[in-house]
Amino acid sequence: MADRTAEFRDDTAAMCEECVAFIRSIVSTADAEGVVVGLDGGLGSTVVATLAVEALGTDDVSGLVLPSSKIGSRSARDAEAVSDVLGIDSETVHLQQLLVQFGNLAPHTDLHGDPIVRENLVARLRMTMLYLSANATARLVAGTTTKSEFLLGSFAKHGDGAADLRPLGGLYRTEVERLADELEIPPFVTERPAAVGFYPGRSDSHDLEAPQSVIDAVLGRLIEENESPERIAATLEVDAGVVDRIVRRHEMTAHKRRHPPTPAG
């Protein structure tokens, strides 16, 4: 079997230094007071918060924990634990009441019937809270999206895809996992499966029926090498159906990575 992780970066110390320098540069250029991170107890937000502390110090990093229902209670507890480990100020704000109000304001929209509608609303409410906090404290919103998530469209438009800076935007999830080892991220974070969106257990690896290393290897050859799906499948010794699913996901979510269309003139 082909090694699907060999081409990914393993110079974790250099990766850490680059991300830390990036955060410092963006915050300094913006003349901001620091960053706000939406903490969900997952790998991405924990790594971003840890890098931000390395770059700016604990006083200039704050976290928001934004559960929307009892389903997210474990994630909220993990997020609060991350805040304690890092020694940063954080606040937990429950969004359930806001969701109820939106349901009342939009009687023709069933927030319980369509999980995608609810999931996107939750993501946008969270980003609204993050920007409210950032604006009030003269800070920037640090996004937690990885390159893998960006290329697969695993984010909500104007939700978790919105940010002032994306420290992990140049790293595949596989590389972020390696970076987490360098940063000594707590096991209760690293041992959780990669999750995307509102519902527990949903992840790209689950939806695409492939391990994360395979997903990243396919994306790397598709984007960095501009290889055809057929060549990717043969080179990586991966089932062509798996490659096709990953490529289709990338193509179908292209609209999320583009600016809104505007008329010429």
Image: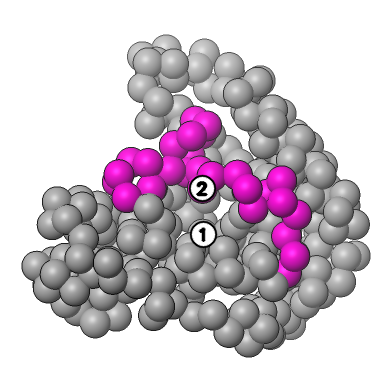
Give residue 81's position: percent from left, percent from top.
81, 44
Magenta segment, which residues?
183-210
Q: Amino acid at mark 2?
A: Ala
Q: Which residue is pictured at 12% across the width and 73% down the height?
A: 231
* Observer-nearest of 106 and 54: 54
* Observer-nearest of 119 and 45: 45
The answer to whether the residue labelled 1 contacts the one labelled 2, judged by CB atoms less than 8 Å apart, is no
* Observer-nearest of 239 and 31: 239
Q: In which quadrant of the rendered view does residue 97 lie?
A: top right
Q: Amino acid at mark 1?
A: Thr
Compared across the picture, whether 216 is left or right of 199 comes to: left
Compared across the picture, whether 252 is left or right of 258 comes to: left
Give residue 116's position: percent from left, percent from top.
38, 31
Asked if residue 201 is among those painted magenta in the image, a careful observer would answer yes
Q: Which residue is pictured at 43% across the width and 49% down the height?
A: 155
Give residue 160's position: percent from left, percent from top.
52, 50
Compared across the picture, whether 68 is left or right of 150 comes to: right
Say if 206 sits above or below 71 in the image.
Answer: below
Give residue 205's position: percent from left, percent from top.
38, 48
Dot 2: within a 10 Å radius of its alpha carbon, few (fewer than 14), some, or many (20 or more) residues?
Answer: some
Q: Main secondary structure of the magenta part?
A: loop
- Residue 7 visible? The answer is yes
Q: Which residue is pictured at 42% across the width and 12% down the height?
A: 107
* Observer-nearest of 225 and 20: 225
- Given the current orientation, which residue lies at the most extreme left position? 230
Viewer-side label of 1, 2: 2
Asked if residue 95 is among those painted magenta in the image, a careful observer would answer no
Under tag 2, what secondary structure?
Answer: loop
Dot 1: within a 10 Å radius of its alpha carbon, few (fewer than 14), some, or many (20 or more) residues?
Answer: many
The residue indicated by pointer 1 is 145
The residue indicated by pointer 2 is 194
